[in-house]
Image (cartoon, coloured by chain):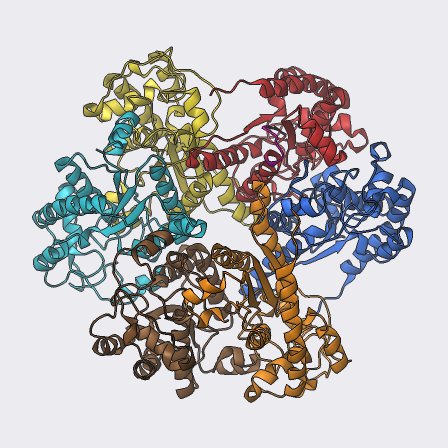
Chain colours: A red, B blue, C orange, D brown, E cyan, F yellow
Amino acid sequence: MLIHLSSWPEIEARLKTNKTVIVPIGSNEQHGPTGLLGTDWLCPEIIAHAAERQDDGLVIAPTFNIGMAQHHLAFAGTISLRPSTFMAAISDWVSSLTRHGFERIYFLNGHGGNVATIEATFAEIYAEWSFLEERAPFALKLVNWWDLPGVHALCSSIFPTGHGMHATPSEIAVTQAAYPDRIKTADYSPKIAPVGPIRDALDYRARFPDGRIGSDPAQASPEKGQRIIDAAVPALIKDVAAFTNEVVPD
Amino acid sequence: MLIHLSSWPEIEARLKTNKTVIVPIGSNEQHGPTGLLGTDWLCPEIIAHAAERQDDGLVIAPTFNIGMAQHHLAFAGTISLRPSTFMAAISDWVSSLTRHGFERIYFLNGHGGNVATIEATFAEIYAEWSFLEERAPFALKLVNWWDLPGVHALCSSIFPTGHGMHATPSEIAVTQAAYPDRIKTADYSPKIAPVGPIRDALDYRARFPDGRIGSDPAQASPEKGQRIIDAAVPALIKDVAAFTNEVVPD
Amino acid sequence: MLIHLSSWPEIEARLKTNKTVIVPIGSNEQHGPTGLLGTDWLCPEIIAHAAERQDDGLVIAPTFNIGMAQHHLAFAGTISLRPSTFMAAISDWVSSLTRHGFERIYFLNGHGGNVATIEATFAEIYAEWSFLEERAPFALKLVNWWDLPGVHALCSSIFPTGHGMHATPSEIAVTQAAYPDRIKTADYSPKIAPVGPIRDALDYRARFPDGRIGSDPAQASPEKGQRIIDAAVPALIKDVAAFTNEVVPD
Amino acid sequence: MLIHLSSWPEIEARLKTNKTVIVPIGSNEQHGPTGLLGTDWLCPEIIAHAAERQDDGLVIAPTFNIGMAQHHLAFAGTISLRPSTFMAAISDWVSSLTRHGFERIYFLNGHGGNVATIEATFAEIYAEWSFLEERAPFALKLVNWWDLPGVHALCSSIFPTGHGMHATPSEIAVTQAAYPDRIKTADYSPKIAPVGPIRDALDYRARFPDGRIGSDPAQASPEKGQRIIDAAVPALIKDVAAFTNEVVPD
Amino acid sequence: MLIHLSSWPEIEARLKTNKTVIVPIGSNEQHGPTGLLGTDWLCPEIIAHAAERQDDGLVIAPTFNIGMAQHHLAFAGTISLRPSTFMAAISDWVSSLTRHGFERIYFLNGHGGNVATIEATFAEIYAEWSFLEERAPFALKLVNWWDLPGVHALCSSIFPTGHGMHATPSEIAVTQAAYPDRIKTADYSPKIAPVGPIRDALDYRARFPDGRIGSDPAQASPEKGQRIIDAAVPALIKDVAAFTNEVVPD
Amino acid sequence: MLIHLSSWPEIEARLKTNKTVIVPIGSNEQHGPTGLLGTDWLCPEIIAHAAERQDDGLVIAPTFNIGMAQHHLAFAGTISLRPSTFMAAISDWVSSLTRHGFERIYFLNGHGGNVATIEATFAEIYAEWSFLEERAPFALKLVNWWDLPGVHALCSSIFPTGHGMHATPSEIAVTQAAYPDRIKTADYSPKIAPVGPIRDALDYRARFPDGRIGSDPAQASPEKGQRIIDAAVPALIKDVAAFTNEVVPD
């Protein structure tokens, strides 16, 4: 069940039996010479929507498509929220969803650079309850799609070298599987991109001139992407079920 | 050119000749018993993407899909930003896009409830420059898709009665044209919904029990929606061109 | 009853029978070569105080004299709040007044540039209740004095041409009626000022060199101003009564 | 020269010779059983406007009429900004005034409860420059009207007992001189109000049941108020001149 | 009892009989050519810890070591919070401590420049309750260590001239008593530093080239510092007891 | 060189040759039945100060002693900043230190719960530069003391079982080495604490009744703590040197 393609009575009815919602969350940012700018929000959306097609008991929120990408701002097309803005926006999403009765919110994340801010936001949200001496009536969970059980191992086996950390062949492949008419090519030089620390945008561009970090995206293919999706979907369904069924102590 | 399906070198190249970007912006909120929760962000996205298919010189940002919908929060599935959060997020989008060299940002809006906050945000952004005694190196424009030249007149002619203000047959029809497999039906009672002031969420639900304001969405059809889209697309292309070519005084 | 010239026991006593308060709100900003910088807060204050003299059952708050005028900052004497500051300040006024038991707050506005921010503030205030699933124990209303029933038509009939949008002969006339010893004159050139979009302060000054937009304030006179006031006062009294007596659905 | 009754060309012209502006600032809050709610903003306004009538070289901004009065909120008619809101608003006033070229901003204050927040705001404003390693191109000064040279001594001599700290006979008298038709009376019990610490609003009302602190306002009279005004006006003119002429080290 | 050297069960047990906590609070900022940068947080810490050694019934929080020192930022080693940040941080400390059941929080302050912001923070905190029409379940108190009964008189008698306002011989002496191996010397020129207003950092450095204001710290000695500490400790113990035992009206 | 025990001329002189500063940062929060509430800020302080005693070329800032500990608020003595407050405070520290010329700021962290917020803060700080298209003139680095090269391995070898994640025998041991007179004992039950997710404070207390997570702190001893300190000190000195000498690309 995709929230944005449903009516409110449909969501209201579903809430009687399912109080877990999945929020695909990512970033719109450069992904090297060939990667789509939308890669990081497209990947979790692709996986979540594929999961919903297999199990329409899942409730999927609209995709949170802009995240924390300040370090990519020296590359055209990147759109970034400041961490403080990102926190406020996530908080309002959570306030909206829990207001309707969702008790478990599962963020399926597609951007490593989002992790710190999302976790800080969870703490900001929980802090309201912690200061009040009340228990939060909901639980929040963050999972990167590549950390779904089995997915990272699969990616490593498909791409034993040149996987890297940004514009990885895994994520490029996932978008190729979903958008085969948008596959772009380039002569990567060097074949495997350098690695290093991440700081501000101009420092980033000096270290990583074409945007990639440690990766060789030329290895990507739609077929490999489909294999990753096919592994991620059941892993997601299972992980969400475990979250839904988690026993909370009194 | 859809930013999220492009690579950064493609956007960088395009910026040499086109410094205008269109941002579809809307809301995810109840649209009566049958309207899609995504209606208000789907409509500007549908129109903007259709325009891009006709004129690939247009640059379209990802869709800003969550807006200011506090008054709809008593209906399940609505997700709202507080106005202050919305302002911060729009500001960061603008900072990101202008950082790359976009000089004109055209927000194609799908939600009347967004208008005040978006305009306040423009003032907040401009104020930074106004206090500094510097001229903003960009211009911002907000246009509701139904205010594109000719569109409102068309909608009125198609739906002379029961158009209303929320969950209108026009917007429902536009989504029906784009998502024909998601058309929902209901027995509306009353046929034409009541009207009244908009305040907080529970007040809203008391006044407008099924979510509609003044509308009879039963009149919608995919064909009518397509007519509206077909009128909106050239109007958008022309309006964007006028914005791009506007002469700014020294 | 003017709050600032009353004692707290007087207000406390009045609250037993009247829970509506009028807040004159405006801006301190340039009004062309001859208009008073205070025009936009003086006009609603003049009208509200005149109404109170006719009907001392009205409760009038102090005038909120600084609003959102970032676009006028290139003209000396303008004082502007950022929209975010304006929102915080209005929120605190509302929190204060509703804390005492006022249930209806009627903002009589004198500046078009305030409208978006005031409406966004209303949404920010209501959102607190909407997220909490509680009903706000008060209602907020914004009315521009020129939109009081009958006033706009009167202004149009007095000034069929050259009314314009900023430094209008209507508002200049209202201040002339109240401050006849402060009437200033100038040779306007052009007689009717240009029109155009409103952006940042330097852009504004480039488009509108003497500050006016579309207006010919030379037509103003104290007598015309008094006619406008005389029309606005009963319209205000009636509109406030309607707001007070509005039936709110359960 | 009162800014709000001037036109922008008049202010622009004056700035060539005078770069100091006086901002009357106060609060709208209970002042005991008989004091006007506006007392704290009326007093500095009365004194500043009287000074301007004697020396029209002075530039007087509109009155900042709402300040920090959270502790008075248990008494009807009080309107308070939170300190953080107050800080933002003062900052925007300063940004506006210094943008036009005012280099010295003199806040003539009428409310002791404002002092800490105004001083914190000055530090907040200066900090922007201090972090940047730049010198602020303006100076800010806060003076309570009763601290103008000679005024406190006069008040003590007129009211040797029962002056107190809130709803003092001095401030009541100043408003009586200016608004003689608004004089109110009551049987004060006790004659001299108690003293104690100031905390939240309900604590305040428990300690100071009729709102006064340490004062016997029955001693006030319009004549005494006029004597205070007559002493404050020349002291203000002289103090502002000293501020204007202060030599700033390189 | 020092909180940071205790376990949570120890604090929980103590809260059954003592609900007052002392927070040493200061600043890390230049103190002239010889003063320690930590002077302003070390002094209240020294006094509070000495008091705790005499009366282990006292509960002492960790030292709040960074305050509002924007005016000292032109001198290396100074670390300052903006007032707005300082306010947020103090608020969170108060929320944490009152959450555990502390009902009285006594800030022992070592920096005059903190006073305005701390008092504004108290108002910000109380305002939450004042707007809600609820009574704050705690009381906050700010005392500068030199204002403890008898201390200021002692300092004046030890240093009848050249005490000044910043880098005073009193505070230097207190740190010398506690950190005798960190005593530094210099040829002060002039012997007694100048006085003047405090604004931004570069203005400060222009007025007070070596950082001192009005003081001759050469008079400090560890012995004098110990005398001051010995006077402050019993005064603190007594003042805290009075605060704890204060009768609050209903 | 400890900043707080130095004078500003000493820091100014040192900045000519050393532009790296170490900030010990932690949290004041419960550490099980026996751990000191200050453990998380004491550990990095102990290690940093020991390193400074070995290599007085190091510049050590005062300890940032309160961090993000909302999940521990159900245990008395815990003091927590909200993530948003923590971010503001860290930002001001960084602004202060870089204002003086420090180009590398090394945060030596003692609390896992701080990591997300500190990293989000780095992004918030860098974002200012990234949006401006300027390069930040400084670099920020976060290192948990247990992640210093070799330290984690040593801790694992000393405590092969029952190390856990909170109130670990490692951190308890480090504080025992530094504060041997503050060693506390208890009968832990169970011997090794449970593990689980971290959410709000009451959820935490329900899952981890005595505060520990996965640990058996009974294994701690001052001798073991000293071994850890002795390993951490040279690792810190070396890691800081590498950071200082890092070559930044143009």
- Spot occupied by residue D164 in the image (x, y as percentages of width and height): 26, 67
* Residue C213 visible at all: yes
- What span is colored magenta in the figure? A99-105
- Out of F157 and D202, give the one closest to the viewer: D202
Q: Is residue C92 left or right of residue F219?
A: right
- Out of A153 and F137, give the one closest to the viewer: A153
- Out of F50 and B81, give the one closest to the viewer: B81
* Residue E28 visible at all: no
Task: Residue E74: name its quadrant.
Answer: bottom left
- Spot occupied by residue F54 in the image (x, y as percentages of width and height): 25, 31
Task: Residue C117: name its quadrant.
Answer: bottom right
Q: Is C67 above or below relative to B168?
A: below
- Spot occupied by residue F114 in the image (x, y as percentages of width and height): 43, 33
Q: How many marks?
A: 0
Q: Is residue A96 left or right of residue B191?
A: left
Q: Tell me if residue F193 is in the magenta stretch.
A: no
